[in-house]
Amino acid sequence: MGRIALNDIRKSFGKTEVIHGVDLAVEDGELVVFVGPSGCGKSTLLRLIAGLDRPTSGTIEIDGADVTRHSAANRGLAMVFQSYALYPHMTVRQNLSFGLENTKMERAEIRRRIEDSARMLEIEELLDRRPTQLSGGQRQRVAIGRAIVREPSAFLLDEPLSNLDAELRVTMRAELAQLHERLGTTMIYVTHDQIEAMTLADRIVVLRKGRIEQVDTPLNLYNRPANLFVAGFIGAPNMNFFETTASDGRAELPGGLHIDVPQDGKITAGIRPQHLRLANREEEALEGTVTLVEALGAETVVHARALDGTAMVTVLSGQPNLGIGDAIRIALDRGEVHLFDAEGQRIDPS
């Protein structure tokens, strides 16, 4: 079992409150990812769950038991850190066994757990090496193995791949997903990398300034962001935003393009760069001037400035013949437009 519940969790450092009344339930076997900008509180929240810090108020429950005042050692959790935190003078085998030996576990059980985790992580041939003899990816496997041998009720992972190069991150991300599938154990994963969050998570928790903005599946966050912050944070390149005023159910975007809206007043229309395309001559379009072209081969990211000065980004397939200073006309699929009210909250179609 590994159900974790946070109930009105608050955390202050001195007079500064950094976590503001967080409520969250992580179900047994879920892989939940915390994302948000630097300083949003995601690592602080993880440390509170781990027992490395204490909340100022609120309660933390694991499988229905209140563990708010329990030490980290008595919560049945295992944490994997960004820095690996391996003992350099010990072999891999000794790193894996160290925590278990401190609990006076029988040697036969320690050996079984080490062999099982080494086989699972494919590090059997590394057991007699020291961390200095390992690559970054191998060290990360050992750090994960040290958590696995504890057979915890949940794993807490704090940006575990951030020290790896881009290619190795892709490999390790896939391995982590497979590991979660095999173990079926609850995992809470902190990252600033959207791709990691979108590809790994059962649910994503989007945090800003110590508050939860939205909790949902990756695709629901992408397709139905609850507010402007989530819409702008999830997805790359960032969503385009156009501020306008709606009247009689209609709103005008730069270049004279019109959209239907369910309410009047100030609104922000958002559309993802992937949902824009070059316009045909006869259709309404967002008009502007190209300011930057990023040719990536299979697709091209085109940055432009609309007639009213609004920046907009378009992801086009292939290699269109566009350069800086060219006039551009961009069409959109009106079914892909996201609408937000004056307070930045999502407006659903009527």
Image (tube, rainbow, N blue to C red):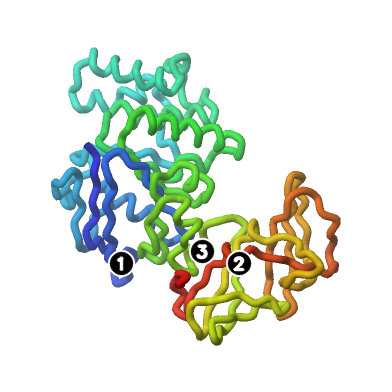
- Alpha-carbon neighbours of circle 3 within 10 Å: few (<14), some, or many (≥20)? many
Identify the residue shown where x is 23% and y is 13%: 108
The C terminus: image quadrant: bottom left
Res 142 → quadrant: top left
Left or right? Give the position of 292 relative to 221: right
Give, as a three-letter code, the residue at label 2: Arg
Measuring 60% from the left and 55% from the top, which residue is drawn there? 236
Q: What residue do we see at 52% from left, 30% from top?
A: 137
Q: Position of residue 341 (x, y in %)?
A: 47, 77
The local secondary structure at tag 3 comes to: helix
Name the residue tied to disc 1: 20
Write the residue at 34% across / 24% down: 96
**At label 1, which amino acid type do we have?**
His
Q: Which residue is mark 2?
A: 334
- Check disc 3 and report the residue beneath it: 231
The numbered mark, 2 or 1, whose residue comes first in the sequence reads 1
**In the rendering, at what x and y percent does residue 298 appear?**
74, 44
Q: Nearer the viewer, residue 124 or 26?
A: 26
Question: Which percent across, then down, holds residue 75?
Answer: 21, 41
The answer to whether mark 2 and mark 1 are in CB contact below 8 A is no
**Outermost residue toward the left?**
65
